[in-house]
Image (spheres, grey):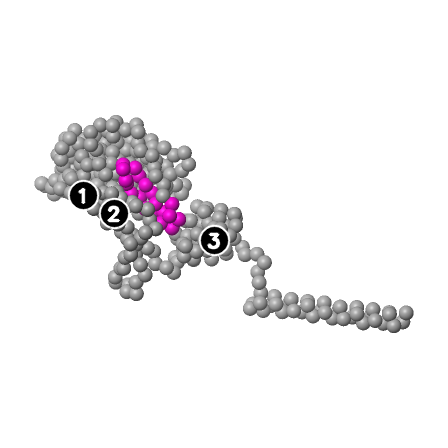
Amino acid sequence: MGFSFLLATVQKERMKRRSRTRSRSRRRAKQDPKTWVARYIPQDLLIEILTRLPPKSVMRFKCVSKFWSSLLSSRYFCNRFLIVPSQPQPSLYMCLLDRYNYSKSLILSSAPSTSPYSFVFDQDLTIRKMGGFFLRILRGFILFTRNLKARIYNPTTRQLVILPTIKESDIIAGPPYNILYFICHDPVNDRYKLLCTVSYASDNDLQNLKSELWIFVLEAGGSWKRVANEFPHHVPSHLDLNMNGVLYFLAWTDPHTCMLVSFDVRSEEFNTMQVPRNAGDTLPRQEKGVVNRVW
């Protein structure tokens, strides 16, 4: 009886010593930054870490869990990813097009280069066949036209969105016409919109000029709607600029009159300003060439 009690007392003391030793080890581990392991990473810290990774790594992490997939697909993270500078240089894309056969095109993307004064291009086989004539780039999206339809491509996710054609247009149903798409962004509501201008003229002197303006909001269930029916008839130029939620582009109302058009993306309001020109200036030949031409 006495021996059993003594043995039990010794074992109890050993267990206490082991418990104290483990507690000391845990405290040392917490104090030592080399062995400290966080049980939970705050979401804001997680976002800061992920925004500094290359796009390919971010896309792979969408497979970690449903939470990560939802986080990396959210608008907040996408906007944050565009703002935070990352180590890799952004890619430069170039589209070479056969002017006599629009179905033949070659997509090139910039490759890593050791010289800051030169670019090295490789054929990009990951991008689907684009075609089209003009590429417009905005916040990582590429807008181009093929078969009269506007198409938006995301090089990071390799997703392609094809917008429907405008069916209610009075000009499209008639003779050959000119169609041009612009992509713009509303920073207040974080919404993307497409502005489409459809125009027609009977000759290069812009006789019998007619034009229409259409807007498409890039969201689920979006559709084309006609706006600014009383806006002056014009032929848009290919030159455009997006700045602070406003789209600017040049337009011609006749061979001698050029105006600067501003489109407020949020309010969808248009304004014009007469462009000063010298006496005798006329519509450039390259601008005339786009009239009566389908892209």
Amino acid on which the number 2 mark rests in the picture: Ser
Which residue in the protein does label 1 denote?
Answer: 100
Numbered label attached to residue 161: none
Task: Name the foreground residue: 13 vs 24.
Answer: 13
The image quadrant that residue 159 belongs to is top left
Cα distance, mark 3 to mark 2? 33 Å
Where residue 152 sits: x, y (%)?
Answer: 34, 43
Q: Earlier in the sequence, mark 3 or mark 2?
A: 3
- Residue at 65% in and 66% down: 26
Where residue 92 sits: x, y (%)?
Answer: 30, 54
Cα distance, mark 3 to mark 1? 43 Å
Mark 3: few/some/many CA within 10 Å (<14, 14-19, 20+): few
Q: Which portion, as a residue range, is magenta?
A: 138-159
Taking the view exactly as shown, the residue that stands out farthest to the left is 280
Q: Main secondary structure of the magenta part?
A: strand
- Within the magenta stretch, is there residue 154? yes
- Residue at 52% in and 47% down: 66
Where residue 237 sits: x, y (%)?
Answer: 21, 41
Mark 2: few/some/many CA within 10 Å (<14, 14-19, 20+): some
The image quadrant that residue 153 belongs to is top left
Label 1 secondary element: loop
Indicate left or right for 259 with 68 as reference.
Answer: left
- Tell me: residue 52, above or below residue 190: below
Which residue in the protein does label 3 denote?
Answer: 61
Which residue in the protein does label 2 denote?
Answer: 105
Label 3 secondary element: helix
Where residue 136 sits: x, y (%)?
Answer: 29, 45
Taking the view exactly as shown, the residue that stands out farthest to the right is 1
